Amino acid sequence: MKKKSKIFAAAISIVWLANVVFALFIAASQDKPKDYSLNEKQKILIFAAHQDDCVIEGGGLAAQDIKLGGELEIVYLTQPTGKDIARIRKKEAYTAWGLLNSNKIKLTFLDYYSDEEWTEEKKASARNSIISTIERISPNLVIIPLKEGGHHEHDLLNTLVLEAVAHFPNIRVLQAAEYNPYYIMWNTPVKTLWLLARLDPLMPYNEPNYGLIPKNQLRLWMTPDELGMKIKMLAAFKSQAGVISERQFGYPDLFENTFSLPAGGLHIMKKYLSPWTLLTLFLTFIMLWSWGLVVGFKYKRSIKYLILGVAIYVGFVIIIKGPLFIIKELLLPICFTLGMISAQYFIFHNRTSKKVAVKA
């Protein structure tokens, strides 16, 4: 059994490595996002579903516009239902934009509450508010969240603003990628590979948003100072610490001209995964399980010590990472540990069978 487990682990590792190398080859051959920057001042209107979204969407672009002498208004679709958290989030929004030190920035909060039912009547009311806001401001440029199949209020806001902007053909619209729940190996292979890293609690996730289709993307060109300012603005949302991570959102603004979601994604664990991505995850889990099996055969320890070791490991991870997303991030080490426990079971079962045979 020991020899078979080693052969299996080696074989599955070779297949996994070949799959990853091919994915990296696909990533290297893809079109890269085009650089984008402001050359003259604009009157910019940013629509955000929630208070922190505005900086993720267009914090860098807004900072550049203010430098050029432009004007900026941020409109928030919703506010939290609790009065205390709503007050905190509003204060954080003012603090974030106050860092730009400009009197040409205005914040508007619409009277809709987050995570409440969006009836057709409520949608119509929001759409009319958006139209009125556009008429009042007369912006040159409107920034909205990209429709990504993620948070329903992000996607709803995208739809409402696009319907409203249809009445104003001279306004340019940029859709901002905030996060992308679609892990499609062919479209965004690097994101799929980083998903594997994100599943490991001891490996940091240091990658920007990828959007949906790279060839449709514009990436804002930002100086180090401008990027540093965006990161400071993100840090102002202290109530969202752990959710708004500099390692994911502390990158230049990314815009994408995509108006329909990719087809073929399977909704699993609140993520959309393509068949190729699912295969990659499956190979990863099986590979780790098989190497856990090899280790379990090599180091013959009792199951109770393995369980104690896992408990200590989980406690360590919770301390350094916090409870947020902890179950998802433990999938990889759990898979490895299951391999070790499986080996212990085979050893125990084999010993028991031998004892029974001797007694017989």
Image (spheres, rainbow, N blue to C red):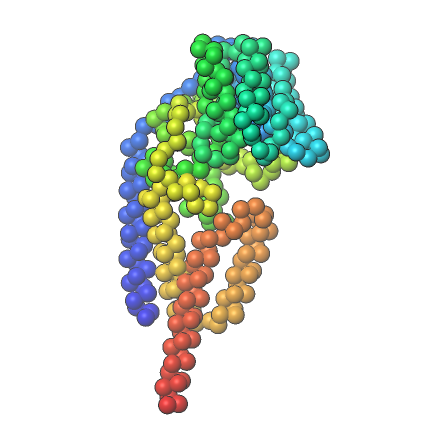
Residue placed furthest toward the right: 84
Above or below: residue 297 compared with residue 252? below
- Locate the C terminus by quadrant: bottom left
Q: As drawn, is 48 to the left or to the right of 38?
A: right
What's the residue at 62%, 16% (across, down)?
106
Q: 48 or 71: which is nearer to us?
A: 48
| Viewport quadrant of the N terminus | bottom left
Task: Name the residue: 54% across, 37% down.
Answer: 245
Describe residue 212's horizontal placement relative to residue 243 as left or right.
left
Which residue shows up at 39% across the image and 56% down it? 288
Q: How many marks?
A: 0
Residue 250 in view in this figure:
no
Image quadrant of residue 208? top left
Residue 335 quadrant: bottom left
* Residue furthest bottom in the image: 360
Residue 227, position as x, y percentages in the image: 52, 26
Q: Position of residue 16 (x, y in %)?
A: 32, 50
The correct choice, above or below, for 56 with respect to 141 in the image is: below
Answer with left or right where residue 129 lies relative to residue 167: right
Quarter of the figure with residue 214? top left
Residue occupying image coordinates x 36% and y 24% = 216
Residue 309, visible in the rendered structure: yes
Q: In front: 319, or 52? A: 52
What is the x, y in percent for residue 267?
Answer: 42, 42
